[in-house]
Image (cartoon, rainbow, N blue to C red):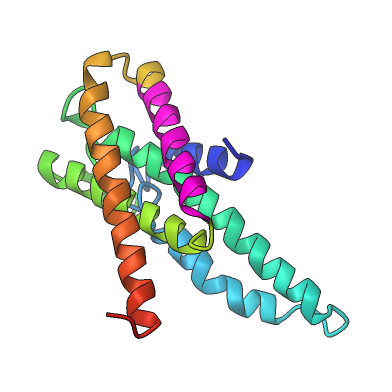
Amino acid sequence: MRPASAAGLFFPDIDQLFLSVLGHRSVVTHSVLLPLLALAAAPPVLARLPRWVGPGARAAAERSAAWFMAWFLLGLAIHLMADAVPLGCRGYALAKLPALPPVSRPSSLACGASLLWYAANAVVALALCEWLLRREGEAVTAARYLASGVVLAVYVLVNERRPILLPVLALAWGAAALVARYAVLALARRGSGGG
């Protein structure tokens, strides 16, 4: 696993540093919202590189930023997929909406909405990862999904300690990977004018 993936894997739980505002499993950190903001901010930031930075170095910086974000999103997708199969569907398992202390406390989404939030964001994170790494060959893509599936299994076994979840997670991860792959291939065909 790449360091960027490890960062993405553990990033969502930074909400625990801000429990009074975000609550644990916040929709802010347990989603693609912040990575999308980073992706949107990257081009203007890179465009402001000093003039003495040549076009080759600028292009390398853009590729590096895209590569880092792709692997970060893969780690995020693993975390979110694991959260989609909690030990129970109450308390910390539920997605939280932010609060405005001292006026309010974080509020929880319903169980089904929480699980759908995690799963949908995991699929979107995978699709974004796939898009950013779309120039990789089929064998590399398959190896990435297989290796990340193993990381997901280990992550769930360590955190949830429920091996019975593994078949469900394997199916969910495979389905998410197929949806992400299909979406990216369809967008690529659409962008190139192919039918």
Q: Is residue 14 visible?
A: no
Of the pair 32 and 142, the residue shown nearer to us: 142
Q: Is residue 118 above or below residue 41?
A: above
Left or right, 60 with respect to 190, comes to: right
Residue at 76% in and 78% down? 49
Q: Residue at x 26, y 31 (%)?
A: 169
- Which one is nearer the viewer's eye here, 147 or 40? 147
User: Residue 143 magenta-drawn?
Assistant: yes
Q: Where is 60 relative to 168, above or below? A: below
In the rendered image, the quadrant that contains the C terminus is bottom left
Q: Does residue 143 appear in this view? A: yes
Q: Is residue 79 left or right of residue 53?
A: left
Residue 77 quadrant: top left
Q: Position of residue 145 (x, y in %)?
A: 42, 41
Query: In the picture, residue 81 is in which quadrant?
Result: top left
Residue closest to the far right = 52
- The percent position of residue 92, horizontal first and vertical second, equals 27, 31
Magenta residues, dominant SS class: helix
Counting the numbered discs, the total is: 0
x 42%, y 22%: residue:
154
- Does the magenta segment cover residue 66? no
Against 145, residue 158 (above or below) is: above
On the rendered image, what quadrant is the N terminus found in?
A: top right
Nearest the camera: 121 or 135?
135
- In x, y percent, where is residue 116? 18, 47
**Which stretch is magenta?**
137-156
Q: Is residue 119 left or right of residue 54?
A: left
The answer to whether 47 is drawn above or below residue 108 in the figure is below
For image coordinates 32% across by 33% down, the residue present is 82
| Residue 17: x %, y % from top left | 48, 38
Of residues 50 and 99, which is closer to you in this image?
50
